[in-house]
Amino acid sequence: MPETRPEADGLRLCESAALTEDGPALLFDVRQYGRPLRAFALRHRGRVVAYLNRCLHVPVELDWQPGQFLDAERQHIVCAVHGATYDPQDGRCVAGPGGRGRLTAVEVREVDGRVYWYPSRDIRPATDTVPDAPPPRDSHDPR
Ligand code: FES
């Protein structure tokens, strides 16, 4: 069986130690369907989770200060605008005007002291570009 190499598919997000239990989230830029958006990763109950930073009520960012998503009890993600409240473990809206949906999850894994995120068909890195073709060789190039 081939060895699992998460770094081969995932994009390195940070060292595990950068995400402390119920501490500030790490923000990172992505594109969803080609549109630039921000995502965030935080550690809750020992597990790293990540979501698009976008409320279900109105499509605005959730954090009340950059990287601050949790309520005073550190139990829920709460939208700073009207208070929609989400379960950090699965992104499900549990109270407020967010309806019955869930935040859009971004796949993350923690391996060997590092956190990786995994682009999907719809959620791509912000800098997801096709490399330019090499310039044509100049016919006057002396090489
Ligand atoms: S915009 Fe998030 S609760 Fe209204």
Image: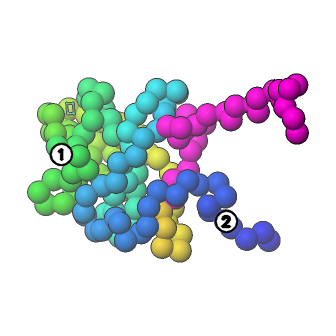
Mark 2 closeness class: few <14, some 14–19, many ≥20 residues within 10 Å? few
Which of the labelled discs sits on residue 109, or is there none?
A: none
Q: Is residue 140 magenta?
A: yes
Question: What kind of secondary structure does the magenta stretch mostly adopt?
Answer: loop
Residue wearing tag 2: 5
Pick the front one: 128 or 138: 138
Residue wearing tag 1: 65
Task: Place residue 8 in its image quadrant.
Answer: bottom right
The residue positioned 35% from the left and 48% from the top of the image is 27
For this orientation, the residue located farthest to the bottom is 112
The residue positioned 18% from the left and 45% from the top of the image is 65
- Vertically, is 9 above or below 121? below
Q: Position of residue 78 (x, y in %)?
A: 20, 45
Q: Quadrant of ligand 1?
A: top left
Task: Place residue 16 in its image quadrant.
Answer: bottom left
Q: Position of residue 67 (x, y in %)?
A: 26, 50
The residue positioned 88% from the left and 39% from the top of the image is 143
Q: Amino acid at mark 1?
A: Gln
Rendering colour mode: rainbow
Q: Is mark 2 within 8 Å of ligand 1?
A: no
Which comes sooner in the sequence, label 2 or label 1? Answer: 2
